[in-house]
Image: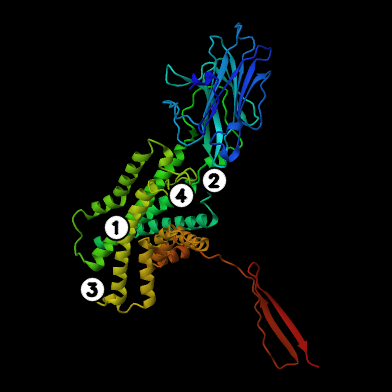
Amino acid sequence: MEVFSLEGTNVTQKSVAVQSAELLMDESRGVLFTALNVGEYNDTFVSNSIIVDNNVKQFTVNPNAEIQLFVNATGSTNETSLPRIGFVLYQNDKFFKSEHFKSKRDFSRKIISGNIPSTNSYNVELAIRRQDNTRFSLQDFACVFWNYSEGDWDTRGCEKILVDDGFLRCICNHTTNFAVLMSFRQHYTYAKPLEIASVAGCSLSIFGLAITIIFQVINKPKKTRRSSAVWTLVSLCAAMLAFNVIFIFGVENKNGANQKSHSEVNITQENTVLDSDIVKTRNDLCTAVTVLLHYFLLATFAWTAVIAGEMYMNFIRVFTVPPRHFKLIQLAIGWGIPAVIVAVTFGATYPFDDLRYRQEEFCWLAALNDDHNFDVNKPMLWAFLLPVGVILIFNIIIFLSVSILVICTHKNNLQSTRNVSYIKKAVSTLSVAITLGITWVIGYLLLIQTDPTTSTIFSFVFCLLNATQGLQIFVLYTLKSPVFLKQVTKLFNKVSAPMIYIHSDKYHMIKRRAKTTNERYKLHETTTDSTEFTLSTTAN
């Protein structure tokens, strides 16, 4: 293509433009190639948008240009007949596949070449319009040429010119295939997951869960079956407590506070071949928070499944003696299976790209693609929604079975339910639903595309119920416990009431029928001795 450009034929196609010109025997021997910006049709070349001027004294950037290449041949040759110069402009880099520079996005990378069949050196200036949009902004660039001997981009003989005029400018001391490699930073709208409702709900849950754990551990019963139920409840509360604490203090990505504005760039003076067209800021702390949140939330649901299994054994298929190694099985389900899921997910995604495992907007599992649509290949689906969905289906089946058994059935082994009021039955059913995390089903309803009003209502209800789940467990399992109320009463009774001393007056009055009436009384003070007074009256 470069040889063809020297034959004097001008061709303009959608993806390539070939132009040629003669160098003039004049003091002004600079040749300027210009490809104008054609707006929405900028992905294809138009014949009238390609301009070659072989009589340019000094290079000045055309504000309407997309790319310009200026070849300055002044004083660079002693030849009597000046050669032709050929230009080739490629719409993309399909013919220039680099092993070093990795292209992750479909950005337009135009390649331009200037060729002169001469052994003399020519200074070349290149200007290309910056590519910024609402989703990406320029981070850095490199002035390069295609090194045919190495089969890759090279920077030798080229330098950057840092001029903030909307164009990226380069200077090279030779003519060949030139390009400007650009790296971009994606714009993120950093979410604020810690709104007032979330903070208040999680804070109350942390308080309730901490009190519940302390109370249940201190008052752990000696009976095996009862102690097993307490142990599973404490494990559930511990997982939920850890999740809430980490969520409040770690879910917000600190990159949001430190990120520069979209107009700021980090262009370096050094001209080196870039590694990729996308720059991603690593945040290992945010990744670690995502791992912990992922693990403890999965562990929370796993322990709800363990509790559901205990309910099945206690109410539906009654076991007089728990199965062998029952506690080890519970440990494996509650803490082990979530660890395996997190480890496999992290190992399958993080080594390639940390944003394949987590989101950048906040520290949680990746769920959306670059177009902000739900991506089934992201770990949010197969590492969280699917396992949690299976657990919720299992819990709902157990919940419905136990609820029907408690409310409608009056068997000998459920003799105590006969005299229980429907209100207490409803409270018991509610406590089971909360413990098994049934309210998380609302989160799956949010995945269904609905109108904004319905989505807002579901979001509010979901936040209200699940952010306060720990508080609800505290109310139903601790605050309503007679043992807890008795201990709280004792605690308040230990606080001695303040002693208040009040001054008092005491009077003794005796009525007598006499000419002279004597009335006596004593005044008693808390800090003085009593004083006796006598009042006398004489009858007329």
User: Hey, what amino acid is under mark 2?
Assistant: Thr
Determine which residue is flagged by label 1. 306
Determine which residue is flagged by label 3. 413
Residue that appears at 38% across and 38% down: 350
User: Hey, what amino acid is under mark 4?
Assistant: Asn
Q: Measure how far apart labels 1 and 3 are at the Cα level.
A: 22 Å
Most distant residue in the right direction: 540
Left-right relation of 335 to 134: left
Q: Measure how far apart labels 2 and 4 are at the Cα level.
A: 15 Å
User: Hey, what amino acid is under mark 3?
Assistant: Asn
Q: Secondary structure at mark 1?
A: helix
Determine which residue is flagged by label 2. 189
User: Hey, what amino acid is under mark 1?
Assistant: Val
Q: Secondary structure at mark 2?
A: loop
Residue that appears at 46% across and 45% down: 363
Q: Where does the image place residue 120, in percent across and percent down from the top left? A: 56, 9
Determine which residue is flagged by label 4. 373
- 41 vs 389: above or below: above
**Within 10 angstroms of label 4, few (less than 14), some, or many (20 or more) residues?**
few
Asked if residue 291 can be seen in this view, the reply is yes
Q: Secondary structure at mark 3?
A: helix
Q: Measure how far apart labels 2 and 3 are at the Cα level.
A: 57 Å
Sequence-wise first label, 1 or 3: 1
Of badges 2 and 3, the one in the foreground is 2
- 336 vs 105: above or below: below
